[in-house]
């Protein structure tokens, strides 16, 4: 009887450790655009790191539930009303001419690094996709300007999750 009790307690402790909200699986949205945990870092600062070395915030800036639809052919995201409110409330004020990095994630996997640019910046990273705010509820993820760089926006994992979640339009 005592050994069963010890096994039960041990099992409960193991389960609670696996469900740690700050553990590696705390990102629960199937698709998300995340800002970095350290918001003082610019894209120039993080380009030297492998994407897996970069920590993201716990909650995405844009999650699957905040997307009304995703135009795959132009990579334009139309946000729901609540998604636009969240985006605007978090106030993406990019003050560095080097931009502000983001990471696109699918099913807790980091897919690619991109950059928010301020309108006044003349610095561009030709190897990174960029997000441009089109209006209050519409964003466009633009392709990296270098034609030698693979278009990371077309990753099959992104397409699959957007299709599964009925968010795709063409």
Image (cartoon, helix red, strand yellow):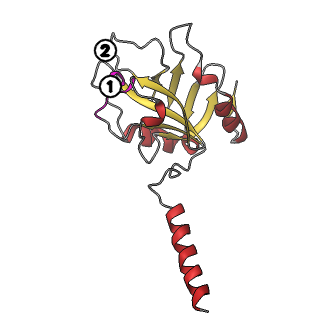
Question: Element under label 1?
Answer: helix
Camera-side residue of 77 and 49: 49
Q: Position of residue 89 (x, y in %)?
A: 37, 41
Question: Element under label 2?
Answer: loop
* Outermost residue, top side: 147
Which residue corresponds to the image point at 47% horizontal and 42% vertical from the top-left? Answer: 60
Above or below — where is 89 with respect to 117? below
Q: Which mark is residue 63?
A: none
Q: Position of residue 44 (x, y in %)?
A: 34, 21
Residue 159: within the magenta?
A: no
Determine the CA span between mark 1 and mark 2.
19 Å
Q: Is residue 119 left or right of residue 80?
A: left
Camera-side residue of 127 and 15: 15
Q: Earlier in the sequence, mark 1 or mark 2?
A: 1
Which residue corresponds to the image point at 72% horizontal and 40% vertical from the top-left? Answer: 164
Above or below — where is 116 with respect to 20? above
Which residue corresponds to the image point at 64% horizontal and 23% vertical from the top-left? Answer: 154
Q: Are marks 1 and 2 in contact (CB under 8 Å)?
A: no
Q: Is residue 169 left or right of residue 150?
A: right
Classify the position of the N terminus by image quarter. Answer: bottom right
Mark 1 neighbour density, 10 Å: few (under 14) some (14–19) many (20 or more): few
Q: Which residue is mark 2?
A: 120
Mark 2 neighbour density, 10 Å: few (under 14) some (14–19) many (20 or more): few
Q: Which residues are magenta?
A: 40-47
Above or below — where is 165 with respect to 93? below
Quarter of the view holding residue 111: top right
Q: Which mark is residue 45?
A: 1
Camera-side residue of 72 and 36: 36
Above or below — where is 32 with respect to 129? below
How many numbered discs, if any? 2
Q: Position of residue 81 (x, y in %)?
A: 51, 41
């Amino acid at each position: 009887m005592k050994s069963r009790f010890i096994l039960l307690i041990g099992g409960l402790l193991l389960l609670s450790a696996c469900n740690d909200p700050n553990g590696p699986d705390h990102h629960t949205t199937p698709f998300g655009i995340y800002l970095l945990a350290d918001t003082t870092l610019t894209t120039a600062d993080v380009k030297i790191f492998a994407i897996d070395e970069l920590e993201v915030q716990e909650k995405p800036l844009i999650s699957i539930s905040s997307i009304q639809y995703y135009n795959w052919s132009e990579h334009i995201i139309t946000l729901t009303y609540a998604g636009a409110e969240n985006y605007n409330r978090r106030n993406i004020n990019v003050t560095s001419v080097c931009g502000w990095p983001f990471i696109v994630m699918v099913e807790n996997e980091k897919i690619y690094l991109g950059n928010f640019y301020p309108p006044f910046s003349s610095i561009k990273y030709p190897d990174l996709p960029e997000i441009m705010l089109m209006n209050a509820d519409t964003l466009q993820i633009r392709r990296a300007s270098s034609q030698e760089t693979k278009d990371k926006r077309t990753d099959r994992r992104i397409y699959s999750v957007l299709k599964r979640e009925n968010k795709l339009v063409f």
